Amino acid sequence: MEKLTMEKIVNLCKTYGFIFPGSEIYGGFANTWDFGPVGVELKKNIKNAWWKRFVQEDDKTYGVDAAILMNPRTWEASGHVGSFSDPKMDCKKCKQRFRADNLIEEHDKNISAEGMTNEEMQNYINDHKIKCPHCGGFDWSEIKQFKLMFETSRGTVEGSKDTVYLRPETCQGEYVNFLNVQRSMRAKIPFAIAQIGKSFRNEITPGNFLFRTIEFEQMELQKFCKESDSIDFYNDYKNRAMQFVVDLGLDSDKLRFHDHDKLAHYAKCACDIQYNFPMGWEELNGIHHRGTWDLSRHSEFSGTNMDYLDPETNEKFTPNVIEYSIGADRLTLAILCEAYEEQQLENDTREVMHFSPSIAPYKIGVLPLAKKFHSEKAREVFDKLSRYFMCSYDETGSIGKRYRRQDVIGTPYCITIDDNTLNDDSVTLRDRDTMEQITLKIDEVIPYVQEKILF
Ligand code: ATP
């Protein structure tokens, strides 16, 4: 198969109802994307799989769904108001804006700009005559820090307006609720708080489809633990995070750990899991040891003591935090890239999405063999099965064409309703990947598919 390009995935996603460009009829709105009927199912199933693995199956993890707009002091405590910014440069010729560190890293893949000062980056760009990737010009502005938080304002009293921020990360919603969760759930350390929700970042160089957008969903958890256990939990989450993406269907040869060279001053260790996207190896998720930084800062800024009293030892301490965070959209992109295959058959080619059945948008395609004779029965079957599964009903075109339509949206099972179904309730069930067919009674389809889609 020829190398998969991002352009191909973007076009396929639009054509088959996965993902559309945001506000398209107005000419779009750069780097926003709308999930369509097929994509919304895929992303929801990915989020559910994450929640099942990390919340449902772990009795020491508690979920929350915190407000997007938080007291602005939160962002002073977290350090975002002071320092959440990227080094930006403008091309004076074409007026496009770029991140200076990205320009350097794209110029030489072996260089990391992580630890460079603005002056060092400016010198590097001048010395290596790095040109504008958009117009090819070499006429750069000075590097300036560009704020990444979206601001809005709230005024409850006529004339007054206070700046509030669209949260750039979800985890602060867990830190500020640490005491609420601990007390209401009578939770003992070690325990974790998890959340799935939207975050917003005014990224300078968004791009590569869902990889970097200005609005995205994070799935993340914060493990609160004693310092003496913290490295074990860090390693544990590294392994669990890797196992999760492998179980979702990502090829382990396209995944690797990447330890951070440069650490935040409070961090003991940090690593990413990278995936080999069509544009190369890039971060898929992060696991960070954050020490006592977050809870100490919130104690300081809010005046509420966030220490934990160990009921067994009577010891009072500020818990350490291990953070595991993965972008739902970025993971969806990795899964789309991994699942796609243009398969050469004996007399034909087919486009197929090999999603793991557990996350496939539709589980069953219900297809009457001949519309005229079998659609009434097929409707009945759809009504029955759709109480259990997301099903797709399709009665138009030849059966071969309908199989192809289900293949490209990754439906793992298609059942055909024909004369046998009218006579004795039996259906033919076709497997998307092997294309093999078996005969089952309608009632047998339910436990058969239920077993296959269990994550
Ligand atoms: P990057 O280095 O790619 O900007 P980051 O290190 O800032 O990412 P974190 O703040 O650790 O990322 O966020 C955790 C996860 O959220 C990332 O691993 C990624 O999956 C996702 N994520 C972060 N920024 C974006 C974005 N702009 N668009 C889509 N997903 C994002």
Image: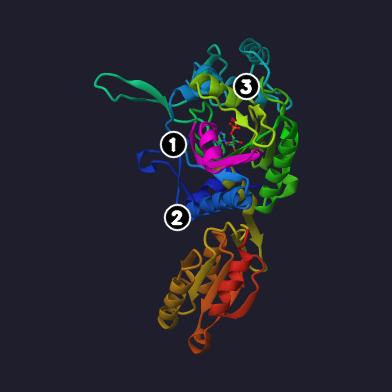
Asked if residue 165 is positioned above or below residue 383 in the image, the reply reads: above
Q: Which quadrant contains ligand 1? A: top right
Look at the numbered disc 3 and give the secondary structure of its residue.
Answer: helix
Q: Amino acid at mark 3?
A: Asp
CA neighbours of label 1 inside 10 A, class few (<14), some (14 to 19), many (20+): few
Q: Nearer the viewer, mark 3 or mark 1?
A: 1
Kindly tell me whether residue 76 is visible in this rendering. Answer: no
Could you tell me residue 376's position as x and y percent? 40, 80
Q: Nearer the viewer, mark 1 or mark 2?
A: 1
Asked if residue 131 is positioned above or below residue 214 in the image, the reply reads: above
**Residue in front for this viewpoint, 75 or 144:** 75
Tag 3–tag 2 contact (CB < 8 Å): no
CA neighbours of label 3 inside 10 A, class few (<14), some (14 to 19), many (20+): many
- The residue that mark 2 highlights is 37
- The residue that mark 1 highlights is 67
Residue at image point 54% right, 26% down: 134
Question: Is residue 177 found inside the magenta-colored segment of the image?
Answer: yes
Tag 3–tag 1 contact (CB < 8 Å): no
Q: Which portion, as a residue range, is magenta?
A: 172-200
Could you tell me residue 439's position as x and y percent? 61, 80
Quadrant (top left, top right, bottom left, bottom right) of the C terminus: bottom right
- The residue that mark 3 highlights is 101
Whole-angstrom CA distance, mark 3 to mark 1, is 33 Å
Q: Amino acid at mark 2?
A: Pro
Look at the numbered disc 1 and give the secondary structure of its residue.
Answer: loop
Could you tell me residue 149's position as x and y percent? 47, 25
CA neighbours of label 2 inside 10 A, class few (<14), some (14 to 19), many (20+): few
| N-term mark: 1 or 2 | 2
